[in-house]
Amino acid sequence: MFRSMRARLTLWYTGVLALVLILFSLVTYAYLVRAAQWRTDNSLAETADSFISTVSTEANDEDLSADDAAKEAVAAFHSPDRIATVYNDQNEVVAASHVPPSPANLNQWSSTALNSQFSALLTAGNSAPSYATATVSGDDLRAVAKPFEIKGRQYKVLMVQSLREQAAGLALARRAFYLANPLALLLASLGGYFLARKSLAPVVDMASQCEKIGAENLDERLAELDARNELGRLVLSFNGLISRLQASFQTQRRFMADASHELRTPVAIIRGESEVALSNERRTADEYRESLAIVQDEGKRLARIVEDLFTLARADTGQFPLEKSNMYLEETVGQCVRSVESLATQRGLKLDYETSARELFFSGDEGLVQRMTLNILDNAIKYTPRGGTVSVRLKRNGSSCKLAISDTGMGIPPALQARIFERFFRADQARSRNEETNGSGAGLGLSIARWIAELHGGDLSLDASDKNGSTFVISLPLA
Ligand code: ADP
């Protein structure tokens, strides 16, 4: 039960509130006790003062002796819960007020008991009033002793009061705390549970909506909430996540469909060609050779597509094993240019390599850098008609280098330029397929080349393309 967020929140909330309430009650109670004591002491001191003034009035107005005046004042003193005792300078009782009949316990306070309990106050001898608390016959008592002088003689009045009323008041306050605190806690925890339930309800709702979304219905979204609050933002991020998942699923599906489509064509040609070769028993050796050459070409094409797909699959998982080494880019690019020279000549093209820069020191995977350069060079040769020129320019550009490969080919229509780096994208399907080059022709060459450039911290882009030709630019950071 306590695993649910609601229960936990309520429990935490109630626990914290209980602590606060206990602390608050303790502090308040301490203040109440202090205030009650202060009130009792003040009232005792006032009573003692008025008693002393009665004694002095009796002594002066009635012209009585000091002892008689004290006795008269004591006789006139009536209080339901206090008694006054007058002591002379020998600490002998001169007069003690009548012990009131109510409350019952007060009857039992004998002068001797009071005398012995508060003897410290009597012997203190200072001129200021002094206070003390003591228990007499089971009653808590508070007393003040106040010295005074009548007709040159020193006296002390001991004013004693029961703390019964004060204790009853404090007990009432305690009872109020005992009753009010649990009640407040109960109400607050009910309110807390209700609030937790209410504020977590959208989360519960989101969870059940999420449970219903799977690979088949990734176009569904969570119901939107107010985007200004936290849950609204959570819904937005969830929906964003689902959108990204959907896009990734779609890419994956398209990739699978495109890949199988690309693989089907060479497989179909190989099957068809071998069936034709086997069906006719009276074929010449040249005819068999021709069929085998087609099978070989398509086999190569198949191998290249599979190799490209494997590269991209490993690129996607980020697990391509990089074999880094140090190289001079002008030499690596030079090797690539030399390796396509015969192909260019065969296709009646002029291949032109020019670099003014020397010692373009680069650290990377040489095999991949060659593959990237060859992919662009192959395309330039593949898409440039006979008599055209393919030029390669390599130059230093600050801390990086710039490799521009231009051709005088047919160019890429402006509307399609943004898409040529997409996987399996071909600007002209028929045109690519019919060319006899060592490119895969599956529309993967540019995406692999761009991935290699980015893997090395660089970039590949189409700089310009129109009916007079295209220029691709690779920039790589130098070591
Ligand atoms: P492909 O294997 O088809 O060459 P790429 O990814 O290398 O695949 O290129 C994608 C498409 O971009 C090509 O099919 C082609 O239409 C276009 N393209 C690439 N390079 C050139 C170029 N130099 N001139 C004209 N079109 C090009």
Image (tube, grey):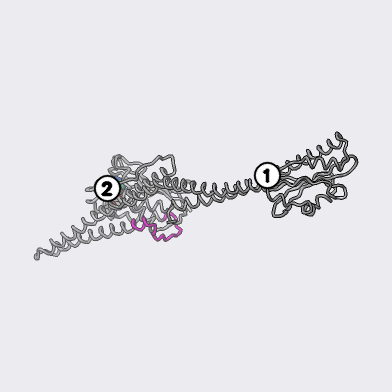
Secondary element at image label 2: loop
Residue 35 against residue 264 in the figure, above or below: above
User: Label 1, label 2: how many angstroms apart (C-alpha)?
Assistant: 95 Å
Mark 1, mark 2: which one is toward the viewer?
1
Residue 82 visible somewhere in the drawing: yes
Q: Which mark is residue 345?
A: none
Range drawn in magenta? 311-331
The image quadrant of residue 152 is top right
Q: Which x, y percent locates residue 384? A: 28, 46
Question: What number is the disc on residue 426?
Answer: 2
Dot 1, crowdedness within 10 Å: few (<14), some or many (≥20)? some
Q: Nearer the viewer, residue 27 or 48?
A: 48
- Asked whether 434 falls inside the magenta stretch, the response is no
Indicate which disc, 1 or 2, sits on the residue closer to the N terminus. Answer: 1
Q: Position of residue 468 (x, y in %)?
A: 30, 40
Asked if labels 2 and 1 touch by Cβ distance under 8 angstroms, the answer is no
Q: Which residue is mark 1?
A: 36
The quadrant in which the N terminus is found is bottom left
Q: Position of residue 27 (x, y in %)?
A: 63, 47
**Furthest-right residue in this view:** 152
Amino acid at pointer 1: Ala
Furthest residue toward top: 61
Q: Nearer the viewer, residue 105 or 236?
A: 105
x 88%, y 50%: residue:
90
Q: Is residue 290 left or right of residue 344?
A: left
Q: Is residue 147 above or below residue 308?
A: above
Q: Is mark 2 within 8 Å of ligand 1?
A: yes
